[in-house]
Image (cartoon, grey):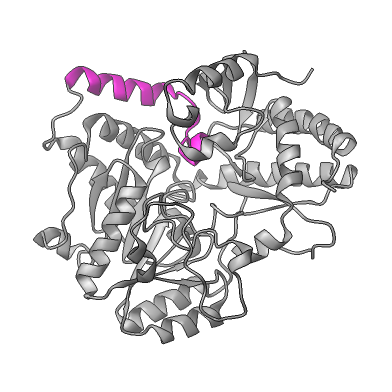
Amino acid sequence: MPATFTKSKELFARAQNSIAGGINSGIRKMEQPVPIYFAKGSGPRIWDVDGNETIDYQLGQGALLYGHAPAGLADAIGAQAKLGIHWAAQCQLEIEVAERIQSMIPSVDLVRFNNSATESVMAAFRLARATTGRPKIFRFEGHYHGWGDEGLVGFANPPATWTEDDELPRTHPSKGIIPEVTEHFVLSKWNDAAHLQRTVDKYRGQLAAIIFEPALCNTCCIEPVEGFMARIRELCDRDGIMMIADETITGFRFGASCAQGFYGFKPDLTILGKAIGGGTPFAAIGGTKAAMAKIISGESIHAGTLNANPLCLAASKWCLDEIINRGDTHPAGTIALGQRLMSGLSELARKHDLPMRPQGPGLAFHTVMLKPGAAEGPVMNYRDYVTRHDAPRWAHLRLMLLEEGVRAIERGLWSISTTHTDRDIDDTLARAAVAFARHAAEWKPAV
């Protein structure tokens, strides 16, 4: 029988009396049929308050690379909690974590710690402007860089704002932002080298930084085309622009040297979040000595009462050691499992005549659901995704999967943890077979 979520519905109704909107992050309200309340997790599986067991590919929005409640991580946090929870001062752990990051990522000479990647992005933008003396940040449509005023400029430009103009709109999805913020950003299309070149040339001398997700995981799962990273690096070197890799999702998931090692490029600054703390509120900004100079001098202020919190540092040390100890087996293992899952889902889609086309490197991937008449082939950028992806149909299939005990992120992203096994893939595909059959029988497009 499909899972039901009676207790979650009751708790969500209760929460709305004390929590604004009933949830503590706006995106969580997207989950259907209700924001789910969880009771416990172990490895790749979670149990909600209704007792439903689910194979998890959402993994805390990608933070749980090591699965749910790993014993070693819990022990590391517990041991530190007995020594001290917060000092607002230094401890040896912060040096040990920094040295690990330094040894793992060739582009990182120095780091500073934060509590969220949104904060690290804010610090990176300030640092880039302080270093270059220039006002504008160059970014790509569909790339997410935190929920702050600056992070969401042009993230999801509505189709109604699209024109044939080479200058892309700088919309913001939130009310209440400082209006002038949008004027300090320049937008381009991902994987479009010609548009990248034209836009950089147009704003030459005004750009402080170019920021991007190395693999666009927040909108579909779109890898960079051959030569695109190299072209960004060339333009940054030509014009003295700082190259910022936002590895909030990709960091350490794509290997010890992150996506920059996986795809072979070297940024000036790197944003790290999610997997660096294994689910604790921990993030970092790292970079070359030259890129971090204005933070060292204090000209670019970087601060925070809870920065380098010892509980988070203890968690991060354990997480980084997990990656280091896996050596060359990571990310090969998660890639293989993910590609096997993608293949199995594709086979189910063919069997039920569903226009679902998984794409991505395997360790993370997106289940694209093509609209009627949409062109085949990989999705290449944000506008391509919006034009071709049938979001309502995917939402229906996603609900069927959830009711059968398989959980992916609402937007269609799947992540593989280091605790998933071949048995979990087999179990997932068996459950997905029921979900796909239900979807094929029940789906009715809107008239």
Q: Is residue 124 above or below residue 187?
A: above
Q: How far from the left and from the top, in percent, is residue 205?
A: 31, 84
**SS assignment for the magenta stretch, majority:** helix
Q: How far from the left and from the top, in percent, is residue 73?
A: 37, 26
65 or 331: nearer the eye? 65
438 displayed left or right of 315: right
* Residue at 56 percent of width and 47 percent of height: 332
44 or 369: nearer the eye? 369
Please tell me in which quadrant of the rendered image residue 161 appears.
bottom right
385 displayed left or right of 316: right
Q: Is residue 7 above or below residue 377?
A: above
* Residue at 73 percent of width and 60 percent of height: 388
If the image is split into quadrants, where does the N terminus sit? top right
Which residues are drawn in magenta? 59-83
370 or 310: nearer the eye? 370
Q: How far from the left and from the top, in percent, is residue 186?
A: 42, 73
* Residue at 43 percent of width and 32 percent of height: 24
- In the image, is residue 73 part of the stretch drawn in magenta? yes
Q: Is residue 95 above or below residue 383?
A: above
